[in-house]
Amino acid sequence: MQSRLLEGHNKGVRTLAWAPEGKLLASASSDNTIRIWERDGECLKVLEGHKKEVHFLAWAPDGELLVSVESGREGSDDVPAVVWLWHRNGEPKTWFKTSPVRALAWTPNGEYFATGSVDNAIRLWDRNGKLIKVLREHEGTVYSLAWAPESGLLVSSRGEGEILFWDKDWNFTREYQKGMKGSITRIKWSPNGEFLASFGGGRIALWSKEGKPLRALTFEEKHAHAHTEDIIDIKWSPDSTLLASASWDRTILIWDTNGKCLKMIQVADLRSGSQFFSVPRSISWSSDGKTIASTFNDGTLRFWNREWECIGTGKLNFIRKTRISVTPLAIFREEDTGDYDDKALWSPKGNALAAWERKNNRIIIFNWVTTISGEFAIKTPEKIKISEKSKKTKSCTICFQEFLTVDELSECHYCGTVYHSKCILKWVLEEGRVICPECNNLFIIVV
């Protein structure tokens, strides 16, 4: 893979969003700014106007407008959310205040967007920021919004196991259905719009497009293979035939739409010497549905084919937990905990990833140059910083030749063993992987 660094934010990034065609990346930072980047790393525009951190970004389906929302997180229910609308070129269109926001989503046709708030309301806004309608059937905070891909039906959820269905004119159509016990944190339509999946706690429920509860997938009493702890993420396959779920119980489960568990995936945690399984932080399907990817708490990124054979493994240094979603891979760290929070997204064409390195306040965009095969290193060795101790090393551990200049050095992040850059680069280009002979860890990923 080749990489480019996107530098400019002076504080941690809170969220990233790719434009639908995958050419522009929007990043929102704790420095209260939004930046619009091109794939080549050029910053096209710095968007200034927000006075607090931005927690939500969403591009309109046509990529011509960007919505950003500041504040509105748990613990700040008494602080109004400020919503901005921006043109694609970064020029501000309008801004307004509303109740603290917990959910944001555009309609499939891009004519309107909706916000779900802590005052139990869903608000519909047009492309000029004009309030069109307020939906008030909820009896609690609106945590999730999802529009059916074709029909335009809206589904919303709150934390007490309730899902509400709205018709294309945003009229409330039916009483909520309780598809599971406990809270519902997220809802997702299948790509063909035939099924709706909701999850919360350790259970997933499937619904028909008419709002009829179909089945609960992860009740322990129904399945030998069922999640026993909270679910972190779910993702539909592009053909809508399979649903993948990742859980804190250290498993990824693959389900069909009849509720049958087809496969359980578990990965040994490298940090424990393979004594324990690692927690999957996120899952994602490639656009052709032939590959599924997941990141894990031990910092690995892994790929499987539809026969559920692992076809690739990468080691992501410094990354503690990551998520993968639908466009380029985006990874960034959570300021409060010092740990890595995450988003991970394939590009629409599946040929780019974006990663956030909080330590140096920069974003890294990676472009695929080879197919996924075996283990791989993400950064080329000439980008690696060399410690003062390693600069005094006389010869390469691989070829045993002496170093003539410091520029020839590459250093293993794990054990500090030093190599010729040309030796490492040859491995990257020819074998697609670099394993340190000294400590057996996958070589260098992040500067």
Image: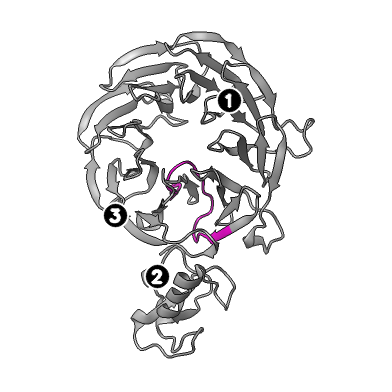
Q: Is residue 48 above or below residue 433?
A: above
Majority secondary structure in the magenta region: loop
Q: How far is the residue under mark 3 from the one under mark 1?
A: 38 Å
Look at mark 1 in the image and give the residue it sits on.
Answer: 195
The residue tagged 3 is 40
Image coordinates of residue 92 in percent, x first then y, are 21, 32
Q: Position of residue 58 (x, y in %)?
A: 37, 33
- Tell me the quadrant of the picture where the C terminus can be found: bottom left
Residue segment shown in magenta: 312-337
Seen at 52% across and 25% down, the residue is 193
Q: Amino acid at mark 3?
A: Asp
Q: Earlier in the sequence, mark 2 or mark 1?
A: 1
Q: Is residue 237 left or right of residue 93?
A: right
96, 245: nearer the viewer: 245
N-terminal of the pair, mark 2 or mark 3, is 3
Secondary element under disc 2, as helix, strand or loop, is loop
Numbered mark located on residue 384 in the image: 2
Name the amino acid, label 1.
Phe
Magenta span has 181?
no
Q: Nearer the viewer, residue 390 or 401?
A: 401
Q: At 68% from the left edge and 53% from the top edge, which residue is drawn?
A: 277
Circle 3 packing at 10 Å, graded few (<14), some (14-19), many (20+), is: some
Q: For the residues carrying marks 2 and 1, which lies nearer the camera in this image? A: 1
Q: x, y percentage for residue 163? A: 57, 19
Residue 327 lies in the magenta stretch:
yes
In whole angstroms, how far apart are the C-alphas of marks 2 and 3? 20 Å
Q: Quadrant of residue 113?
A: top left
Q: From the viewer's perspective, is residue 375 above or below residue 171?
A: below
Q: Are marks 2 and 1 in contact (CB under 8 Å)?
A: no
